[in-house]
Amino acid sequence: MKRLPLIIIVIVAIVGAFTLRDYLTFEALRDNRQMLLEFRDENYLGTVAAFMVVYVVIVAFSLPGATIATLSGGFLFATFPGALFNIVAATIGATLIFAAARWGLGEKLSEKMNASEGVVKKIKAGIDENQWEMLFLIRLIPVVPFFVANVVPALVDVPMRRFVISTLFGIVPGTVVYTSVGAGLGSVFAGGETPDFGMIIFEPQILLPILGLCLLAVLPIVIKAIRGKKGL
């Protein structure tokens, strides 16, 4: 029974990967943009609620289309409050999958890691000693899949409060970037263009500030390691 939520997530994720990949796409957003804008204008609060529910479901069940959902937040609601809606919904969805993984696997796995010796125990101890820094780091690094960043902390006994706080603030840079891109999709649609969303985050003006934040997250870990070697 404890593993049932995690099993459901895995099943829905697999089914969704095959059934929804043609619906949660840039082309679907482009083709239905006028209908979405009209619905938003007629029922703003209802659109916000529906959007956030869909976003939470996408993240919680690791369905395809998270990037499109973030862009849609910017397209429908502008950079602000679109970024706020995206951040809150993504955090709720991430927390749900974190809780499912923790309940289903985390406790037993954490007990095994604590009882183990050698390299495994050292890795667990290193994570425990630098939890805040590691949590922010995996959120800031663009190459870490969102699903991985949601599940791994649950398996190494990270407290939920730390997970929620680090997720809420750690996803801000990347989310704001993609939301702002979504806010400018009107001109992209008008020009009939299709931007390469996979490369947006790697633009120098975007990537360099994020890497700077990554260095700030790593710095305390490095300082602790140096002090440990010197016995300070």
Image (cartoon, rainbow, N blue to C red):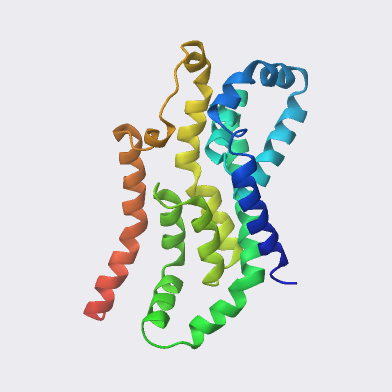
Q: Residue at x 73, y 28 (%)?
A: 47
Left or right of 6? Residue 232 is left
Q: Relative to residue 154, is residue 44 depicted above or below?
A: above
Q: Residue furthest left?
A: 230
Q: Residue furthest top?
A: 190
Left or right of 226? Residue 92 is right
Looking at the picture, how far across and down is residue 48, in whole percent?
71, 31
Q: Is residue 60 visible?
A: no
Q: Relative to residue 181, is residue 142 depicted above or below?
A: below
Q: Relative to residue 189, is residue 201 depicted above or below?
A: below
Quarter of the rendering occupied by the C terminus: bottom left
Q: Residue at x 62, y 68 (%)?
A: 102
Q: Is residue 21 visible?
A: yes
Q: Residue at x 62, y 25 (%)?
A: 77
Quarter of the rendering occupied by the N terminus: bottom right
Q: Count how many numbered circles sit on residues in the image.
A: 0
* Quarter where residue 127 is shown: bottom left
The residue lying toward the viewer, choosing from 171 and 2, is 2
Left or right of 173? Residue 26 is right
Q: Relative to residue 16, is residue 218 depicted above or below?
A: below
Looking at the picture, how far across and down is residue 112, in whole percent?
53, 83
Looking at the picture, how far across and down is residue 79, in whole percent?
54, 27
Looking at the picture, how far across and down is residue 222, in whole percent?
29, 65
* Quarter where residue 221 is shown: bottom left
Q: Residue at x 61, y 52 (%)?
A: 14
